């Protein structure tokens, strides 16, 4: 598996307040804003942060890795008996996604952007 980016996704009560805090005090900037969702990034090697409104996971946190070759990784994880809690699927916003859950309930998400049609 080749990991090319990392993201921490957090479920919070007030997405805007958390975004302001991370921007003001830790130098993050908003790169994507939608209803109930903000993605923040920095120009250095820090992981991106996604803020989600409401309940998204039992733990309130998701560690997400952008990878290459996600279909092969899905097959490998199934062969190894990993707890794949969301099977590989194409999301409406254009990424392939799957989720694993570790023995302590931490959700690990693997994603790979799908190329636009015609590429």
Image (cartoon, grey):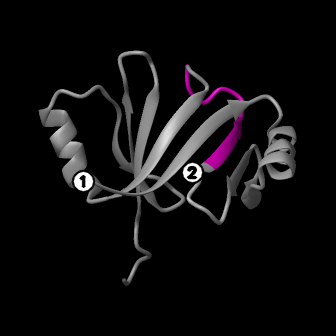
Residue ID at (71%, 29%): 54
Disc 1 designates what residue? 71
Q: Where is residue 6 in the image (x, y as percent from the top left)?
A: 49, 51
Q: Residue furthest bottom?
A: 118
Label 1 to label 2: alpha-carbon separation: 23 Å
Which of the two residues, 41 or 59, is positioned nearer the viewer here? 41
Range of magenta residues: 49-58
Disc 2 designates what residue? 47
**Relative to residue 26, is residue 13 depicted above or below?**
above
| Label number found at residue 21 | none
Secondary structure beneath label 1: helix
In this rendering, would 36 be left or right of 81? Answer: right
Does residue 111 belong to the magenta stretch?
no
Q: Does label 1 or label 2 sit earlier along the sequence?
A: 2
Secondary structure beneath label 2: loop
Q: Position of residue 57 (x, y in %)?
A: 56, 26
**Relative to residue 6, is residue 10 depicted above or below?**
above
Estimate how packed mark 2 is, as few (under 14), some (14 to 19) or many (20 or more) residues with alpha carbons within 10 Å: some
Q: Position of residue 43 (x, y in %)?
A: 65, 66
In this rendering, would 106 be left or right of 52? Answer: left
Does residue 51 belong to the magenta stretch?
yes
Residue ID at (87%, 50%): 24
């Amino acid at each position: 598996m080749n990991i090319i980016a990392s993201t921490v996704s957090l479920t919070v009560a007030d997405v805007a307040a958390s975004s302001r805090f991370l921007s003001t005090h830790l130098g993050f900037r908003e790169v994507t804003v939608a209803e109930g969702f903000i993605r923040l990034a920095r120009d250095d090697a820090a992981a991106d942060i996604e803020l989600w409104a409401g309940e998204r996971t039992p733990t309130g946190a998701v560690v997400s890795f952008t990878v290459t070759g996600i279909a092969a990784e899905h097959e490998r994880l199934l062969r190894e008996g990993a707890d794949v809690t969301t099977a590989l699927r194409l999301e409406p916003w254009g990424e392939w996604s799957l989720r694993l859950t570790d023995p302590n309930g931490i959700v690990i998400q693997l994603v790979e952007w799908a190329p636009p049609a015609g590429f």
